[in-house]
Image (cartoon, rainbow, N blue to C red):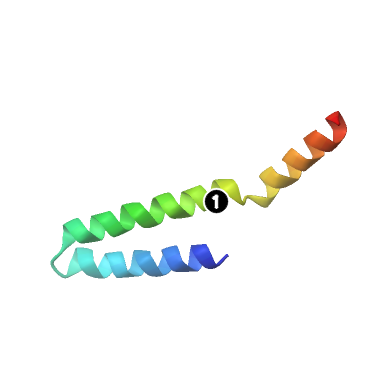
Amino acid sequence: MTIYVLTLIASVIDLGFMCFGHPDIGGFISTAAGIIAAGFGVTYNPVRMQSWAEHHVKTA
């Protein structure tokens, strides 16, 4: 859960960069935060992990 808070903070910082003169840096921060959040969302999705465990328990 901490990763989502960190990426939310990064998005707020990104907004500051975008609004106050450095849109290229803001765009980089935004892209990096989005990729990190998306990666962790896919990896640690509890629904996905549960269905994976059920599948492997049934087939084992």
Residue shown at 43%/63% (left/top)? 7
Depicted 23 relative to depicted 59: above or below: below
Identified at 58% across, 47% down, the residue is 43
- Horizontally, residue 51 falls left or right of residue 29, namely right
- The quadrant of the picture occupied by the C terminus is top right
The amino acid type found where label 1 is placed reads Gly
Q: Which residue is mark 1?
A: 41
- The picture quadrant where one finds residue 10 is bottom left
Q: Is residue 56 left or right of residue 28?
A: right
Q: Position of residue 11 (x, y in %)?
A: 36, 64
Q: Residue furthest left?
A: 21
Q: Is residue 17 left or right of residue 5?
A: left
* Position in image of residue 48 (x %, y %): 67, 43
Which residue does the image show at 73% across and 39% down from the upper left? 52
The kind of secondary structure element at disc 1 is helix
Picture quarter with the N terminus? bottom right
User: How far across and how far down the image is residue 57, in percent?
Assistant: 85, 37
Q: Residue drawn at (40%, 70%), measured in percent from left and top?
A: 9
* Percent of width and height locating residue 29: 30, 59
